Amino acid sequence: MPSLLERLREALAPRYEVEAEVASGGMATVFRARDTSLDRVVAVKIMRPDKATATGEERFLREARTLASFSHPNMVAIHDAGEVEGLPYYVMDFVEGETLAGRLERGTLEERAAIRLGRDLLDALGRIHSAGVVHRDVKPSNIFLVDDRALLADFGVARVASPDEETLTSESGPNPGTPAYMAPEQATGAECTVRTDLYALGLVLYEAMTGRRWQTGLAPEAGDWRKVPGPARSVLRRALELDPRDRWPDAGAFRTALRTRGSAIRLPRWAAILAGVTVVVLLVYAVGGDSLIPTMAPDPLLDVAVFPCEATDESHRELATNIGHRVGLNLQGIPGVATADRFAAFNLFEHRAGNLSPADWVGILRARHAVRCDVDRTGDGVSVDLRILDDQGHPVEDDTLLVEAPDDGELARLAAARISMHVIESVADVIVTEEAVDRFSDYTWDAIRPFLWGEDALMSGAWRSAARHYGNALDQEPDFTLARLRLAEVNRWLGHSPIGEDLSEILRMDPASLSPLDSLLLAASVTPHGPGQLEAYGAILSRPEYRFEAYATLLYGDELYHRGGLCGVPLDSAVAVLELAVRRDSFLVPAVEHLTQALIRTGRAAEAQALLPHLAAIHASPEESFPYYPDVWGLGFVERFDPDEVAAARVPLAQAPPELLALYARWVRYIDSPGTQIALGRQLTDVAGSLGSAELAAGGLIAQGLGHLSLGRVQAGLMTFDSSARRIRIPETEVQTAEWRTVPYGLGVEGFPEVEAERGSLVLDAVWNQDDRNDLRARAAWALALLADRRGDVEALERWYGRLIEREPQEDY
């Protein structure tokens, strides 16, 4: 009778040459083989014949299908499955590295290696948990170490969410799994959840760091934590809570908390310095509690918060609102006067329906005084009841101002100037003229009026109305610099480029209408993306008078979120800054939107779920904003945390405009769901084919390429980017394709070969030398600086980085 090895050789020939048995367990046997068509070594896992019942075979093959659907860089890849001559089998990568169990026989892991191990495994667990699978046997012997990468293996007793809650393969006893690595609920036969796997991983990491196994059933507070590095202690304590409800809610939250004392990436000198600056700024920011608008640190207090003026008659509401806006604008940048964030003050007033207390302007806006005005129309003028209140709500100034003028424009200007002068005299020991206070006297009312309407629309996130109003203001006064800057900001949140001009052109306009803060933010915005821009924003927010500016904090958080990782700044820092922006102004729509997607991306499901209704409540209507972010991140939440509802949630996209599908396919990368991005990218490519749109097809291919890269399929991703560049030959796609070859290699990301980086560098070098687009040249220089640093080419690093930070003549960009 032929042996099992002989039977398998004959059954799988000629596709596979089975060489030898390498491992055997209670349910299956693993053989080493050669895939003759691809000339590579593989592993063939078969179910033991004595265990091959009909139910067992179905479960065994379902394990193969489930694992094959994951395709994750921290899981063993499955290539083929089937049944031959009564032998159920599947083919997977042959892993030649040692197991973690074998590695620990030689001693414990260093802190950085243990953290990297944990984060790799949490990536894998997050992927399977999102598909409703619980591993139930996370232990050192089921973890392989290959090229500094951890692979999770052996799903033989995993449980997949299904109507009958069946295991993937046959049970290995009443409590499948390994007793030494079981959570309390698993050991007692209770239901296993994702938190069961997280407990087991906590056991594994404790053992990897200390060399000792955790005592079964021991409460975290009773354990010996002396050999666990300080930053990891609280993280593992929570993972090892006896009650599952007290553990980390999911793998994403566990992974976010699990980090080393510093970056694991070798940074250029300038990036390391920047990371230090960022940490200092974040330490300054480390204030407040858990609510959206907490009480801030005791210092510094600003001089004054300006709230909207109220009309005694609703018919005069527009005039009163305009006066209030102009007072806030007038006081910005007056030497000796520090004003609270104007938009934050107006938003707070609007959403509190004007019912403000000293706690609002002191505790939330950090201002010593509040400015309140009631405006009443009187014939050819207005009567303004002005009240300046201190931190106890007592009046510092309580006066009535009478102003007359021939028209509403002059009336609003004069009233605002008089109010501004009274405020300055009451809160600051400075002497200033009325002409110096009124920065907008040179602009006509026909320009000022739509500009102020734009300010109202901007605060509520009504981007399209804001763009229309600012555009109308510019039609009247093309040199109205602040209106042009505001329009550029609106286009930023709409995803458009500024009206045919970039921000550097605005910088060369007359700065008279800009406050000092506006000027600083504009200068920071035109600094090329990267460490220089981050440092510029950080420097602004380190100034006492701007520490509590919500919009400035948002811009800093936005840059950190999208590009901080390229400078070695962890994503956690970006999320912390976005949280601060929302605390400063919980009604600032782009700040709440960014924080919502950041919480989804980092696996903080409960917080994201709580914030989504708030985003919907403050967001303008879908007609005012494309995209409509409550829908965007509502779908993102389902994609990340509720896989059972994904199919239903995607149904509306089939009938949606292709532009909306393109947006989802592009933006889904922000929630770290590569499988979703590939699926939506394919859907977009299909739609583009039916419409004959090369641009949409390119977008679909880019989405698929990003998804492949996120899954570790480097060559597949790069080839997809190449296909995109061939579909639509424009500089942006060429630069993006080159960047994805160069930047990850420059950062030392695993799997990106040097030969591809060299190909990308040739394209980027040509862009620098030949293209006249300043933004593309800056991107090329940034990528080439990273590549030079990776190669240790100090001369090239200094040259490329110098071109970014020394602000050479504009024509050189």
Image (spheres, grey):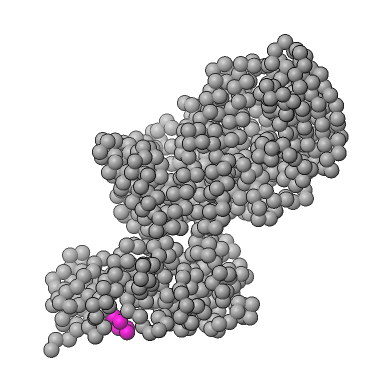
Identity of the residue drawn at 46% across and 80% down: 189
Q: Quadrant of residue 540?
A: top right
Tell me, yes or no, if residue 439 can be seen here: no
Front-most of residues 523 and 405: 405
Inspect the magenta stretch and tell me whether residue 144 lies in it: no
* 122 left or right, relative to 39: right
Number of on-image labels: 0
Q: Quadrant of residue 777?
A: top left
* 236 left or right, relative to 119: right
Tell me, yes or no, if residue 56 can be seen here: yes
When the figure is inspected, residue 808 is found, relative to residue 738, above or below; the finding is above
Give the image location of residue 681, x and y in percent: 34, 47
Give the image location of residue 747, x and y in percent: 46, 54
Give the image location of residue 456, x and y in percent: 61, 30
Identity of the residue drawn at 34% across and 68% down: 76
When the figure is inspected, residue 253 is found, relative to residue 375, above or below; the finding is below
When the figure is inspected, residue 270 is found, relative to residue 215, above or below; the finding is above
Q: Residue furthest top?
A: 406
Identity of the residue drawn at 73% across and 17% down: 411
Q: Which residues are magenta?
A: 23-29
When the figure is inspected, residue 50 is found, relative to residue 751, above or below; the finding is below
* 371 left or right, relative to 598: right
